[in-house]
Image (tube, helix red, strand yellow):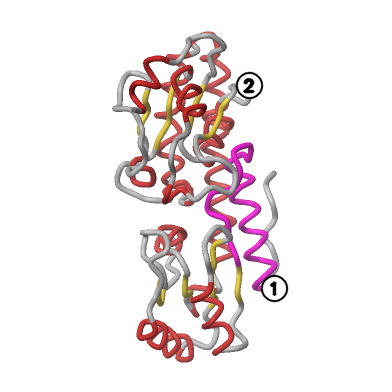
Amino acid sequence: MLVAMLVAAPMAARAEIAVTLPPLAGLVHMLDPSTDTFCLLGAGADPHHFQISPRTAERLQRAELLIRSPAADSGWPLPADDSRTLTVWTDMNHAWLLPSAVARALPKVADRLTRLYPDRKNSTGKNLAAAIAVTQQVNARWQAALAPLRRVGVIMQHPSWKPLMDATGVPVLSVLESPLHGHEAGPHRLEEALAVLKAHPGAVLIGDVRHNNRSLEWLSRHAPGHRLVYLDALGECGTAWPSLMRDNLDRLMTATRAETPPANR
C-alpha cells in the first residue's frame, strides 16, 4: 500500500531532505542551514509505534533525499533503500547522543549533501570542519558534567543515554525498560533495582520525557534523596544538534545542582 502511494504521488513542489528522526535534521542543519528538512516522526509521536500517513508518504516521495538510522527506525514502514536514501548508524541505537558517533557520521552526510547540491560544496566543507569542532566541545562539556556520576552511577528508565554513559565511564547500575518501548520492569525487577539504589546512595535517576517513567518514579519514592532528572533523547524537528545536547546538559546540571561547565555557543 505504501509503495503504491509513493509511486502515485505527484512530483510537484519537491521537498529537499526528509529524515526519520528529529536529531538527523539537526545534523543536516549543522552542515547546510539553508536546507529545508522535514521529519517523518511528528511532534510528540512515539518512534516505537510509528505509522506513516498518506500525506507524509507523499512528502517523502517528493523529497530529494531520505536520511535514516536503521538501528532506531528498523521497524518503520519505509520504502526500500534506493539512491535517495542515506543510511547512518546501522549498529547503534540513539547514536546521535554520542558526540564521537556524530563526528564520524557528519562527513558521510556532508558528502551526500555536496553531491546533491554541488554549488554549496565550499560552504558545506567549511561547515563540516566547524561541526566536528562543535562535537568535540560538546563532548568535553558532557565529560565534565558526568565526571561526578562516575563515582555514584545511574539508574535509567530507558537505555537511550547508555552509549554516552558507557563512553564516559559512568556505571549504569540498572535499566528499567528494554529498548522495546513500553516493556517496563516487573515487581521483582523493581525490588532488585531498589536494592541496588539503596546500595549506591549518590546514584542519579535518569528518566525520559517521552516515556512513561512510573518505574523510575516508584524507585524515587521508595529511596528518597536520589536526584531525578528527565532528559529528552529526540528533541524537536527544528532543534539543531548542539542545542539538543546543550538543553539536555542544562537539565542534568539543574537536577544535580552542579556547576555547568563554560559554554561554547
The CA distance from mark 1 to mark 2 is 38 Å
Residue 115 occupies quadrant? top left
**Is residue 76 or residue 83 the one in the foreground?**
76
Span shown in magenta: 230-256
Residue in the picture at 41% in, 77% down: 173
Percent position (x, y) of residue 185? 39, 75
In the rendered view, does 31 fall on the left or right side of 169? right
Q: What residue type is disc 1 on? A: Arg
In the rendered view, does 179 fall on the left or right side of 259? left
Residue 258 occupies quadrant? bottom right
In the picture, the disc for residue 34 is 2
Percent position (x, y) of residue 98? 46, 51
Where 50 sits versus 163, above or below?
A: above
Residue contact at pointers 1 and 2, CB within 8 angstroms: no
**Is residue 240 or residue 122 the one in the foreground?**
240
Residue in the picture at 38% in, 39% down: 69
Percent position (x, y) of residue 14? 53, 14
Q: What residue type is disc 2 on? A: Ser
Nearer the observer, disc 1 or disc 2? 2
**Secondary element type, mark 1:** loop
Percent position (x, y) of residue 189? 36, 82
Which residue is label 1 attached to?
A: 257
